[in-house]
Image: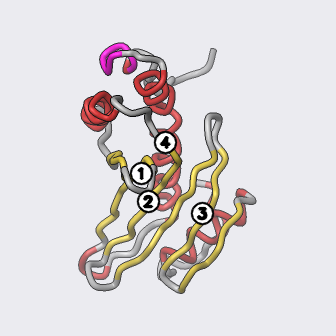
Amino acid sequence: MALIEDYFSSDDIHPIDMVETLAEAHQWDFDRVTDDQIAMMVEGQWRTYSLTLAWSDHDETLRLISTFEIDPPAGREPVLYDLLNRINDQCWTGAFTWWREQKLMVWRHGLVLAGGQMASAAQVDRMIANAVSASERFYPAMQMACWGDQTPEDAMKVAIAEAYGRA
């Protein structure tokens, strides 16, 4: 059971309300930007990630964008793009893109809830967890490719798959 499920008794709750409750439970800094949007900061091992979740009534989608700053040295952009293609081949629940002008690495994911479906607390919890875990998993590879003069192939070797079980 996801942590957030302890706080809800209704299946008919706005997705952003779920996110806000989850942020409170984890004691993350957040700002309820509008009724349909929330921004928060989530501390990871490598970085602090800025997450924004927004609900669109028009296309019935809960969108998550997680960002962190990255500004590769001149000449390393082609290496970063090659690496991003390799990384995205390993991701099933979202994808990375680099916003060059803003100097931001962006993880994007959309949860389509067409036909009046409601997001479950577990789905919202998983969206956030996936964004942070993907960023944590691939951040070292991005560093090695941009500043360590590693090839994308070599940089990917540091992207450790999720561990299962206990040591």
Q: Quadrant of residue 83?
A: top left
Identity, as a three-letter code, of the amino acid under mark 3: Glu
- Tell me where residue 103 appears, x and y as whole percent: 45, 50
Identity, as a three-letter code, of the amino acid under mark 2: Ile
Under circle 2, the secondary element is strand
Identity, as a three-letter code, of the amino acid under mark 4: Ile
- Tell me where residue 33 appears, x and y as whole percent: 57, 80
Residue position for label 2: 65
Residue that appears at 70% across and 59% down: 28
Residue position for label 3: 5
Q: Are marks 1 and 4 in contact (CB under 8 Å)?
A: no
Q: Earlier in the sequence, mark 1 or mark 4?
A: 4
Which circle, 3 or 2, is nearer the viewer? 2
Residue position for label 4: 70
Under circle 1, the secondary element is strand
In the picture, measured across the screen, residue 107 lies left or right of residue 125, that is left
Q: Residues within 10 Å of mark 4 (few under 14, many from 20)?
A: some
Q: Earlier in the sequence, mark 4 or mark 3?
A: 3
Under circle 4, the secondary element is loop
Q: Are marks 1 and 2 in contact (CB under 8 Å)?
A: yes
Q: Earlier in the sequence, mark 1 or mark 2?
A: 2
Q: Residues within 10 Å of mark 2 (few under 14, many from 20)?
A: many
Q: Distance of mark 3 from mark 2, alpha carbons?
A: 23 Å
Q: Distance of mark 4 from mark 3, alpha carbons?
A: 35 Å
Q: Distance of mark 1 from mark 4, alpha carbons?
A: 10 Å
Residue position for label 1: 106
Residue that appears at 38% across and 33% down: 74
Q: Quadrant of residue 141?
A: top left
The residue stretch that appears in magenta: 151-155
Which circle, 1 or 4, is nearer the viewer? 4
Identity, as a three-letter code, of the amino acid under mark 1: Val
